[in-house]
Image (cartoon, grey):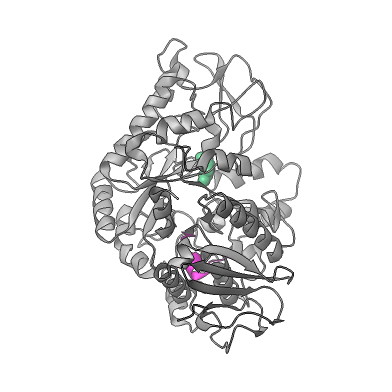
Amino acid sequence: MKKEFSDCYDLVVYQIYPRSFKDSNGDGIGDINGILSKLDYLKDLGVNAIWLCPIFKSPQCDNGYDISDYRDIDPIYGTMADFDRLLTVAHEKGIKVIMDFVANHTSSEHEWFRRARSSKSDPYHDYYYWADKPLNDWRSEFGGSAWEYNEPTGEYYLHCFAVGQPDVNWNNPKVREEFKSIVDFWVKKGVDGFRCDVLDHISKDFEKGLRRNGPHLHEYIREVFGRDHLLNLYTVGEAETTEESILATCGQDRRELKSVFQFSHLMVGRKGRYTPVPCRMDEVKDILEGWERFTEERDLLYVLLTDNHDRPWFLSRTGNDRELRYECATCVATMVYLLRGVPFIYEGQEIGCANSHFDDLTAFNDVECLGYYEENKDKESEEKLLAEINFGSRDNSRRPFAWDGSPNHGFTTAAAPWLPYASRSDEINLEADLASEKSIWRYYRDLLALRRERVAFRQGSCRQLQPSKKDCYVYLREYEGERFLVVCNFEREQRFTGLPEGRLLLSNLKRRAGANGVYAPYECAVYDLTNR
Ligand code: NOJ
């Protein structure tokens, strides 16, 4: 494996939703100086990279995924000087900084779009997609038609997301030059990587009805990220995850991206966004194992995650966010983060955050769930819609981080945060977790230390054992004579026999005598099998 790819196995990325991490100036919104004040917290946890969701200037119609100036910081988050300081201090502490790269759309407030929409003859007009009438029946991801009328030119523009997020026309070479120079701007400052938002949308094919994965996708990605001075960046794309397209995007000879997210295991337990279905961990395991095999055999980087800002909490989807909250959170983390790939931890996972329940729509902010409500309010009962939104809203994972059990949870000094705290924040907060014998945070710290200390967990091969046994994931990690066994039991108590025995390194229930024997629901353990 090329060095710039194999180095990525050392990364442990912590995703920060800046609005909700830590407020330093008392306005109820998290900010850069808040993040700065928590870098030691992250270092203690054992992460060595942070990915910041967009902090660029933005009208915030999609919480920053609508950018009006790619080279400036939104004042709600601070200043460029604050960012520069964050970057310097993070680097001093050995923490890399990964930025969000939002290239499929800008904000409708971006100077390019203001000019583009003003007249057909404006030089920026061709930076976006225009049509005299909607070219197709595409729907916006957030509800309504994907085409919006623009009075000054008498045309419609395309927005695959919100009305305030017009899609950019990447077929225009000037657009590609703009984005290359934006990437260079941040790289020159010293950022270490990019998480590329809906990157597969940057090439479309209207004739074939493709709003993503158009014919020029790979050419455009290569044009931006395949340049020599960028080859050491860590890049991860939000893109289609068929085997074929992962190979096409992340192959080491492709000069495109280092990795893409795979989300298929995160669809287990729900149908679409808002309908719960039984969540079978075996199904999650089979999907993970499938990707593990596929990526290992082809020497591709795999991304290990269960949560992000676009999904309700995985822990809640498993149905174990009450009695077995500690057991399930730690077992799932063990199962996922000791696999071969790049771990991504989303803020709050390390204290076992769970979904909220609110009886009122005013407790929600997300453009997606509010759009869903608008589209369905005449067809469905209020009660049903609220239940669906409580289950599926992205706001579940976007609520302010609860650092302690005080009324404002140590997040802000403002009377109220920008979005209500999670409804279980009195129970689920960092202070309470650390005071508990069953601390999820401490388990995460120990788990990440194990990964950091034993190269086999990062670079080693991975082989599933006992594939015929249901309701568990048991695997071996091996590298140059080192061997480790990971046993993760799922929903039911069961007895394991025939496992190789070794020295216990980590277990969530701290009661194991050996690898074989009875495991409680969501009990997990890791053994060193290395012959010394
Ligand atoms: C994916 C981002 O993760 C999500 O939060 C956003 O709404 C859409 N892309 C549009 O940018």
Which image quadrant: the C terminus? bottom left
Front residue of 133/371: it is 133
**Is residue 162 at least partly visible in the picture?**
no
Name the residue located 37 percent from the left edge and 45 percent from the top edge. Answer: 233
Q: Is residue 364 above or below residue 282?
A: above
Q: Is residue 249 above or below residue 308?
A: above
* Residue at the limit of the structure toward the top, as seen here: 121
Left or right: where does residue 295 sit relative to residue 59?
Answer: right
Name the residue located 53 percent from the left edge and 53 percent from the top edge. Answer: 302
Would you say residue 351 sits in the magenta stretch?
Answer: yes
- Residue 354 quadrant: bottom right
**Residue 224: percent from the left, percent from the top?**
41, 32
Left or right: where does residue 114 sit relative to residue 515?
Answer: left
- Residue 279 quadrant: bottom right
Q: Is residue 435 above or below residue 451?
A: below
Front residue of 351/519: it is 519
Would you say residue 128 sits in the magenta stretch?
Answer: no
Q: Is residue 464 above or below residue 514?
A: above
**Residue 110: percent from the left, percent from the top?**
40, 29
Front residue of 113/267: it is 267
**Residue 304: percent from the left, percent from the top?**
53, 58
**Is residue 233 at least partly visible in the picture?**
yes
All told, the count of numbered labels is 0
**Residue 33: percent from the left, percent from the top?**
29, 56
- Residue 48 quadrant: bottom left
| Residue range (magenta) | 345-354
